[in-house]
Image (tube, rainbow, N blue to C red):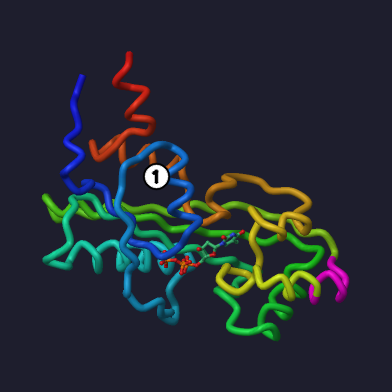
């Protein structure tokens, strides 16, 4: 049985301001610190959506890992976008943009793409990947769109909706990872953390066996 020294800062650091990402990691019992990244979320012309989310995930993790005063060994970054055909839908800046996004998603299928990256500060290595989930929306009425926007929920969410929140009323079906839509592909991230020896879920339960 391995004893944990609780005075030590966690080795795992989530480089994110997203409460959804924090909640997802908390659910599987991991001990981690949360430090929002200030890496810019820019777009590079010609880059594929997969390259885009992986690059931003790596940039977020590397930015926090690069802070000399920041304790920790493994730094996790992630980035989520919604793809309607080839168009990237990020977070809507205002109600007009949110309405436009929801109209393009209405009655159709789109993809939610999340990148994830883990930087190991000890070796300098960065491991990353991307996961795609298909989501089908019901046809939305203008009243549903304006009513949903009035809840305030769309504004800090890629594509202007939250599958885990009120926005679930729009979702007819999904194909693929649910946590990936919420903002962090948990199964894939946990496999990676285990593979590189960074962490395993439910460490408490493991110690009792
Ligand atoms: C599609 C969808 C996205 N989202 C959220 C997940 C992300 O937080 C957000 C996409 O923006 P991101 O830029 O990926 O993340 P963020 O700015 O919220 O946090 P950080 O960069 O600091 O890690 O959209 C949901 O919560 N539910 C959904 O159904």
Q: Is residue 189 left or right of residue 109?
A: left
In the displayed structure, 50 sits above or below 5; it is below
Q: Is residue 74 left or right of residue 112?
A: left
* Residue 142 highlighted magenta (yes or no): yes
Taking the view exactly as shown, the residue that stands out farthest to the top is: 209
Residue 28 picture location, percent across and down: 43, 37
Quarter of the image with the N terminus in it: top left
Which residue is drawn at the image coordinates 38% and 39% (left, top)?
Answer: 190
In the displayed structure, 156 sits above or below 178; it is below
- The part of the image, by quadrant, that contains residue 30 is top left
Q: Is residue 75 left or right of residue 49?
A: left
In the displayed structure, 193 sits above or below 68; it is above
Which residue is drawn at the image coordinates 38% and 30% (left, top)?
Answer: 202
* Residue 154 highlighted magenta (yes or no): no
Which residue, given by chain and number where applicable, does mark 1 sit on? 189
> Nearest the camera: 29 or 114?
29
In the displayed structure, 127 sits above or below 35; it is above
Callout 1 secondary element: helix
Within 10 Å of the Cα at label 1, are there few (<14), some (14-19), or many (20+) other Cα atoms?
A: many
Residues rendered magenta in the picture: 140-146
> Nearest the camera: 115 or 201?
201
- The part of the image, by quadrant, that contains residue 166 is bottom right
Q: Main secondary structure of the magenta part?
A: helix
Residue 54 picture location, percent across and down: 38, 62
Residue 29 picture location, percent across and down: 39, 37
Residue 23 picture location, percent across and down: 47, 49
Which residue is drawn at the image coordinates 25% and 40% (left, top)?
Answer: 198
Quarter of the image with the C terminus in it: top left
Taking the view exactly as shown, the residue that stands out farthest to the front is: 7
Which residue is drawn at the image coordinates 42% and 45% (left, top)?
Answer: 25
């Amino acid at each position: 049985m391995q004893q944990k020294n609780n005075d030590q800062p966690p080795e795992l650091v989530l480089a994110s301001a997203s409460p959804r990402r924090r909640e997802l990691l908390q659910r599987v019992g991991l001990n981690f610190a949360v430090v929002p990244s200030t890496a810019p979320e820019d777009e590079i012309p010609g880059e594929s959506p997969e390259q885009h989310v992986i690059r931003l995930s790596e940039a977020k993790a590397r930015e926090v890992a690069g802070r000399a005063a920041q304790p920790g060994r493994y730094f996790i970054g992630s980035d989520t976008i919604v793809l309607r055909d080839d168009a990237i839908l990020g977070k809507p800046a205002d109600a007009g943009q949110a309405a436009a996004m929801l109209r393009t998603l209405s009655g159709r299928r789109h993809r939610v793409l999340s990148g994830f990256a883990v930087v190991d500060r000890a070796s300098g290595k960065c491991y990353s990947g991307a996961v795609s989930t298909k989501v089908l929306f019901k046809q939305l009425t203008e009243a549903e769109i304006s009513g949903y926007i009035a809840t305030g929920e769309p504004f800090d969410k890629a594509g202007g909706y939250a599958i885990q929140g009120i926005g679930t009323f729009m979702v007819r079906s999904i194909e693929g990872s649910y946590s990936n839509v919420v903002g962090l592909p948990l199964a894939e991230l946990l496999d990676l953390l285990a593979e590189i020896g960074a962490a395993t879920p439910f460490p408490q339960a493991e110690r009792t066996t």
